[in-house]
Amino acid sequence: DVKVTQSSRYLVKRTGEKVFLECVQDMDHENMFWYRQDPGLGLRLIYFSYDVKMKEKGDIPEGYSVSREKKERFSLILESASTNQTSMYLCASRGTDTQYFGPGTRLTVL
Amino acid sequence: EDQVTQSPEALRLQEGESSSLNCSYTVSGLRGLFWYRQDPGKGPEFLFTLYSAGEEKEKERLKATLTKKESFLHITAPKPEDSATYLCAVQAIGGSQGNLIFGKGTKLSVKP
């Protein structure tokens, strides 16, 4: 079975803090994705990566950056957290047929 | 613009009452259509992939079908444990690196 894990299920941070969300997959997939999910807005793509050190912006990259130093690990960075970044963050890894998601991180920025 | 629309937004059923969820899409060319199930506070769980019109996939009480413009997720004799949000997504031909376009989901509630 494909396994995608995320570093935290719940996270509470203060405005202005730098926040790191980590995602690890165990299937040697090349493509990995970060989404945020908000009520009424659905899943929105923040960034994706198609290889180590390669990244592309998604639909809403402002306020975020990413890092992919190893194939299995894809990190999402909030440079200076703001209250409007309170959301559910989902990481996904793409296999031959579809994307497989991690359990999500519920981030609250106070 | 590539787009995915799901209807209804919410659906309440009695246990055993069969129904269907709709996913209509507009893409320049379809590489694949995907159904996921999402429980509250969790990540989406992959259910099915459909690639061409006329294709059908089944899993327990769920059956997914595909036409050139839409997909249906049929739920036969649902049980309370089928309650979840069901997400539909498409991958367009020429879409970059496996990126999926998601609908906003249908929230299904099945009452005993």
Image: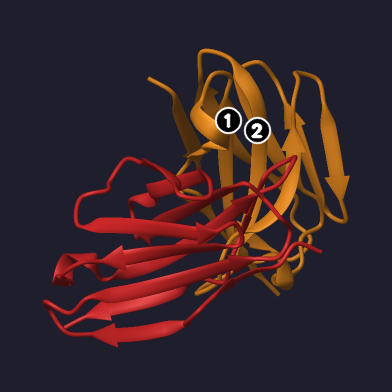
Chain colours: A red, B orange
Looking at numbered disc 2 in the image, what kind of residue is underneath it? Leu
Residue receiving disc 1: B91
- Residue appearing at x 49%, y 51% in the figure: A33
Q: How crowded is mark 1: few (under 14 residues within 10 Å), some or many (20 or more)?
A: many
Q: Residue at label 2?
A: B33
Q: Which residue is depicted at the point 56% across and 39% down?
A: B89
Report helix, strand or loop for mark 2: strand
The one of B4 and A36 positioned closer to us in this rendering: A36
Q: Tell me, yes or no, if residue B80 can be seen here.
A: yes
Q: Which of A70 and A15 is in front in this view?
A: A70
Q: Is residue A80 above or below residue B32?
A: below
Question: Where the C terminus of chain A falls, by quadrant?
Answer: bottom left
The quadrant holding residue B109 is bottom right
Query: Which residue is at 17% across, 79% downward?
Result: A17
Q: Name the spot of residue A30 as percent of width and height, x first.
A: 62, 46
Q: What's the amino acid at mark 1?
A: Gln
Q: Is residue A28 left or right of residue A37?
A: right
Using the image, name the chain to which the residue with label 1 belongs. Answer: B
User: CA separation, marks 2 and 1?
Assistant: 6 Å
- Percent of width and height locating residue A39: 34, 60
Please, is residue B22 above or below residue B81 in the view? Answer: above
